[in-house]
Image: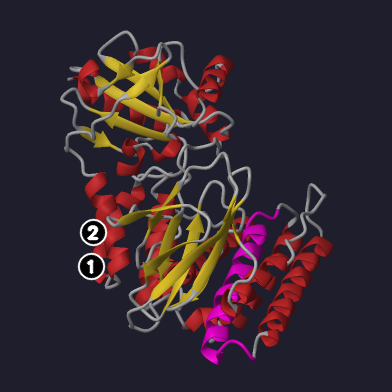
Amino acid sequence: MRTRRNLNIYTCMLILLASVTVAKGQVKFVIPQFTSTQASDSIILYTAHDYLTRGIEEPSNKKVWKLSIGNKFSLDLGQEYSFLVIQNERFTNRNRPLLVKNGLEIYLSIDSTGRISLAKGQSKLVECQLKFEQLSKYPRSKNIKATKKDVDNLLDARNYNRSRMDSILSAYALYLSEAEREMLRGNCAAGIDLALFSFLGHINSDNDIIAYAYNMFQQIVQDSIGTHYEEKSFFPALIGYYNFVREVNDLKFKRSLYGQKFIFKDLYNQIKAKTIGVVRDRAVTECILKEIQYDQFPIDYLDSALVFMKDSVSRMMILAQKESRAIGKRIYPFAFEDVKGRNIGLDDLKGKVVVIDFWFNGCLGCAKLGEAMEDVIEKFHAGNVIFLSVNVDKKRNNWIKGINTGIYTSPYSLNVYTNGLGKNHPFLLNYKYRSFPQLMIVDRHGKLVTTNATRPFGDERREELITTIENLLK
């Protein structure tokens, strides 16, 4: 769940992805109209040559352009084709990877409310991709337990979307090269199946229906072998994520049908065994970036992943995780605002073991952690342990409402929030926290003990966390 607020500067992140051929070039952005009275008079453009779906890092290069009627500005691609992702809180079009080529003009429009969109009159390459937004969403079942008909409806929707995709591409055959159409086909097809996998992976039903869904899933995976998005990594970020989700779903189905429990090691090894090259590197990295948000075990695999990884982006992401989560380093400096408006930093907590949890209002997992922490807090709050509860909502009012519910924090906790920056606070970005809740421990010298402390769900895990804290107090 994300909160939104109007920003003084609406940030437009343009992230360039997946080099196809190397040739210098530029994409020109044109603003034919500008009637907004609420938006800032500038946008910020970020450029990078690649990213992972779960690991967008702020690039070192950023540029600012003024918004005005008829204004034009250019962005260097560094290659003939790239995939472009436009992210903005006020951007109305989907965050779909947009294939662009050198020399292309992209038209932006800003309305009276400050919303930014892709204007009419785009090139055929962009226009074709905007047609993909006409694809249907997958139907949601109204049944508590899915039926065979529900599963069939999902497959029908997939087949319709693939047929519609082919029709759109055929309509642009005179305007787009075969290579351009194949790049678009591969990435659109992968997106269609990723959305389907999301539904199939959460099916709740009897074993015979789950087995039926699993058979469908296996057939789709088998049919994808040798296709555009399986063999050609035009957009490595999407291909890597596709392979990661595919293996997660496979293990989930086996757990539901056969009671086969799986841990991170199983997922890691299965991805590693079934993929090769850049696809393997990206899929393993996606796996680590996702699972490290919930468990401490992925940290143990960072070094082993670096042994075989050749892809530079994957290596950069894994090295960033290793650096940010290194035990024994002085904790990243912070200043969080408390309920009285005071800034709380590490110097205010000198000599104390600090247990830090991160949460947002409306997060069920955060409420569950809050309840599980009660016995731990009760045991240590009167001693040399500070329980710092950091809210990541953007709106201060949401934070206060969350505290007043009494389900996220303890009366003994020191309540602070990220000063309106939400999950984009520098402290959270440094430790790569993108999902919540999170639990961190800092020793009495201000050094990191763990960025992913044991969550006290159940007696055994509770005792493990208590023992960790007790050892730090000795």
Image side of residue 296 versus residue 332, left or right: right
Q: Which mark is residue 303?
A: 2
Disc 1 residue type? Val
Q: Nearer the viewer, residue 219 or 103?
A: 103
Q: Is residue 198 magenta?
A: yes
Q: Residue at point 27% right, 69% down?
A: 312
Secondary element at tag 2: helix
Q: Is residue 186 magenta?
A: yes
Cα separation, mark 1 vs mark 2, equals 7 Å
Q: Residue at point 60% right, 48% down?
A: 35
Above or below residue 419? Residue 119 is below
Q: Nearer the viewer, residue 448 or 84?
A: 84
Pointer 2 local density, CA inside 10 Å: few below 14, some 14–19, many at least 20: few
Looking at the rendered structure, the number of numbered marks drawn on it comes to 2
Q: Residue at point 73% right, 82% down?
A: 167
Predominant SS of the magenta segment: helix
Whether residue 227 appears in this view of the structure is no
Magenta region: 174-203
Q: Are marks 1 and 2 in contact (CB under 8 Å)?
A: yes
Q: Position of residue 136 (x, y in %)?
A: 74, 65
Disc 2 residue type? Asp
Q: Position of residue 159 (x, y in %)?
A: 74, 76
Residue lying farthest to the front in this orientation: 69
- Disc 1: which residue: 307
Above or below residue 413? Residue 224 is below
Place residue 269 in its image quadrant: bottom left
Q: Which quadrant, please, contains the C terminus?
A: top left
Image side of residue 339 versus residue 470, left or right: right
